[in-house]
Image (cartoon, helix red, strand yellow):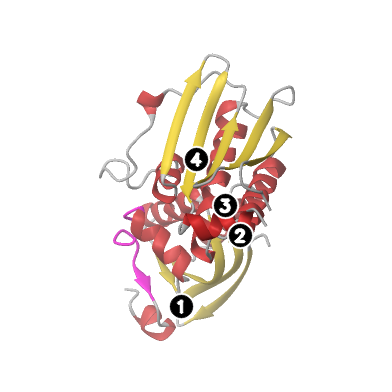
């Protein structure tokens, strides 16, 4: 299943609920467009909820890195929420787990934004 | 299921659909040959990454160039070979994605993931394309081999 996203606002933070696969092609493009669209609207505090993302490949990892740096370069913050074990393990072996701010509780994640 | 000493081959177009098909075939064959859920995922992902390299970097989506995918079950291993018809991968240009200067790069993790997930990885570039061989040992080989030959 390709990636689907839906956005909601909680205390000024945009939570992007993602479900499906973030892989080369459509999945990566959906994520890229979603983040780009939020930045265009001035929404720079983004929490990517990956709880229903069951698969991610190297292109998808690259897309997460791209989203992270793009938001950061525009003075915003992008954090990750609810990683599945598969995604968690991938970020561990690629040493990106410590680069991203990864959270497992939505309430505390929302409060953690400056 | 691949029987012991059996082989299955595919010749595929240089498209994104090929990447998905290669992953799917790897997943089914790995599962049918007794690998556990985590190993099936690892094998399928390694094949996906190798197929991405073949389609994008090797054949560069050229419709005249094909990707050859072979699965072979030997007594102790599942051996997967992916060949493209590109210019040949420059092994010296494969970056270390874990080095600090590369950590935030948006690409360059494919070969690293393949090596992380498979037991043996052999890359053979030539002027007529790149061949990458991925080997996963079958755990508990005697039982698995017996099951495979039934």
Q: Which residues are magenta?
A: A94-103
Q: Mark 2 highlights which residue?
A: B147
The picture places residue B62, in percent across and down from the top left corner, at 69, 25
Q: Mark 4 highlights which residue?
A: B134
Q: Secondary structure at mark 1?
A: loop
Q: Can residue A102 be found in the magenta stretch?
A: yes
Q: Mark 1 or mark 4: which is in front?
A: 4
* Residue at position x 38%, y 31% in the image: B94
* Residue at position x 40%, y 43% in the image: B112
Q: Is residue B129 left or right of residue B28?
A: left
In the image shown, does A16 or B52 lie closer to the viewer? B52
Chain holding disc 1? A
Q: Secondary structure at mark 2?
A: helix
Chain holding disc 2? B
Q: Are marks 4 and 2 in contact (CB under 8 Å)?
A: no
In the rendered image of this protein, does residue A56 appear above or below residue B118? below
Q: Mark 1 highlights which residue?
A: A12
Q: Mark 3 or mark 1: which is in front?
A: 3
Whether residue B109 is visible here, answered yes or no, is no
């Amino acid at each position: 299943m390709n990636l689907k996203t839906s956005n909601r606002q909680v205390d000024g933070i945009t939570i992007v609920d993602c479900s499906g696969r973030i892989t080369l092609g459509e999945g990566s493009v959906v994520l890229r467009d979603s983040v780009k669209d939020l930045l265009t609207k001035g929404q720079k505090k983004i929490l990517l909820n990956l709880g229903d993302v069951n698969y991610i490949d190297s292109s998808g990892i690259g897309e997460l890195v791209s989203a992270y740096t793009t938001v950061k370069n525009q003075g915003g913050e992008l954090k990750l929420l609810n990683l599945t074990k598969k995604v968690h393990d991938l970020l561990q072996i690629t040493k990106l787990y410590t680069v991203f701010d990864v959270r497992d509780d939505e309430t505390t994640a929302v409060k953690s934004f400056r | 299921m691949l029987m012991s000493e059996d082989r299955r081959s595919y010749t595929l177009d240089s498209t994104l659909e090929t990447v998905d098909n290669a992953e799917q075939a790897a997943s089914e064959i790995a599962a049918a040959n007794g690998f556990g859920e985590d190993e099936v995922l690892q094998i399928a992902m390694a094949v996906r990454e190798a197929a991405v390299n073949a389609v994008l970097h090797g054949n560069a989506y050229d419709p005249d160039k094909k990707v050859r995918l072979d699965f072979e079950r030997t007594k102790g291993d599942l051996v997967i070979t992916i060949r493209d018809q590109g210019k040949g991968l420059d092994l010296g240009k494969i970056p270390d994605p874990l080095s600090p200067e590369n950590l935030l790069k948006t690409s360059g993790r494919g070969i690293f993931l393949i090596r992380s997930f498979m037991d043996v990885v052999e890359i053979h570039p030539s002027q007529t394309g790149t061949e990458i061989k991925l080997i996963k040992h079958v755990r508990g080989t005697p039982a698995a081999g017996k099951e495979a030959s039934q």
